[in-house]
Amino acid sequence: MANLNYKMNILVTGGAGFIGSNLVHLLIERGHTVLNVDKLTYAGNLSSLSAIENHANYRFVQADICDAPAMRSLFAEFKPDGVMHLAAESHVDRSIDGPGEFIQTNITGTYVLLDAARDYWQNLPEASEDEANHSSAIIHQPSKKSFRFLHVSTDEVYGSLGETGKFTETTPYDPHSPYSASKASSDHLARAWCDTFGLPVLITNCSNNYGPYQFPEKLIPVVILKALAGEPIPVYGAGENIRDWLYVEDHAEALLTVLETGKVGETYNVGGNNEMTNIDLIKLLCTILDELVPVSSDSSIKSYSDLITYVTDRPGHDLRYAIDASKIKNDLGWEPKQDPKSGFKQTVQWYLENETWWSAILDGSYKLERLGEA
Ligand code: NAD
């Protein structure tokens, strides 16, 4: 897959979620053909893809990755050059309220997908005619040699750091929440399908993402939407937990880079080099909001930061995550492009300009309530 002129058929799972929808936009923009397979749980939202829904290179199929016959027939029909597997239950707080779905989708679903991919891959020709003739033809036929399965995971599998140090690709796994434990299990399965069956798997472990189309229950949209509603902005514990924030479009670019040029069997950590405590991030978002939509003079508050309210911490809340992303930079030349200051401002601006997108969600499946108190 190293010839970057190849236009691939890419099977994306979870493409109507936050990162998946941003990724699908990028893949279509780059001329690839995408089959988006998504169950459309509460977190899946087709309106995130309305701009490309009728594009000739895009197709959506509503299906559960745990449905083995459905997955097998999609592989046979679509004949992908690669898989980018993002479908997952992804919210730590929900994994505390109800771990069952996390075990089902993240572990069983990943197993089903890996096994369907293995069957498909084993029956591909060894090398396509283009590859055998060393041709640089733009149209690419899938082959056993060129096929790739990219398993998309999180830095949360590594557990919690103290005040210093960073996660590298060899940091031992030490997950603490049902979410991170289920993602760790799925990473082990992906690695086993590579080592045992030879399936060409690559794995990425990424830090916290922010940007457009993030479901309103996650930290950044919660802060923005609570502030706009004039409601208390909840801060878990003392707000001292540290996360490394990466702009979602940079993550999407990293995933495509790994699919195209990564080495089979390798893991790549992806991060933004942008550590912040939750309280500093929340205050920054309030400052941006003060600038973009100043609080009215007759309001009982002077700044959105007056709405900050400390609430009981999440059980098992990891203190600090930080990614050492030097491998992907040195080996594949990827590094984040987005300046965090403008990235956070752009994100606030996006939520201000896309009320139709988030108000439709708040009218239905989720109403900004607190989850995961255990
Ligand atoms: P998300 O919750 O926004 O989207 C997940 C998508 O998967 C949804 O569209 C949902 O409908 C779909 N889905 C869930 N169960 C399914 C099933 N059984 N079959 C088919 N589709 C199903 O998640 P996200 O934040 O976009 O994360 C995507 C991936 O990236 C996940 O694997 C997550 O673990 C990983 N990740 C996320 C972050 C982050 O900060 N959001 C960071 C690192 C890694």
Image: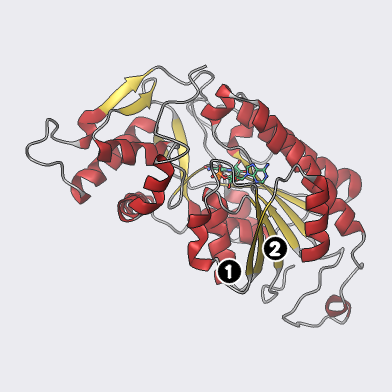
Q: Is residue 261 visible?
A: no
Which residue: 44% across, 40% down?
A: 364
Taking 185 as reference, is 126 above or below it?
A: below
Residue 88: mark:
none
Label 2 sits on a secondary structure element that is strand
Specify the amino acid type for callout 2. Ile
For residue 310, what is the image quadrant? Answer: top left
Q: Residues within 10 Å of mark 2 (few under 14, many from 20)?
A: many
Which residue: 63% across, 72% down?
A: 57
Specify the amino acid type for callout 1. Ile
- Count up the numbered dots: 2
Q: Is residue 177 visible?
A: yes
Which residue: 43% across, 27% down?
A: 241
Is 55 in front, or is 128?
55
Whichever of labels 2 and 1 marks the residue nearer the N terminus, that label is 2
Is 145 in front, or is 232?
232
Q: Which residue is mark 2?
A: 10
Residue 28: mark:
1
Taking 277 as reference, is 10 above or below it?
A: below
Question: Between marks 2 and 1, how big is the CA–CA gap?
Answer: 10 Å
In the image, taking residue 336 as reference, residue 95 lies left or right, namely right
Q: Quadrant of ligand 1?
A: top right
Taking 9 as reference, is 122 above or below it?
A: above
For residue 195, what is the image quadrant? Answer: top right
In the image, taking residue 19 as reference, residue 331 lies left or right, namely right
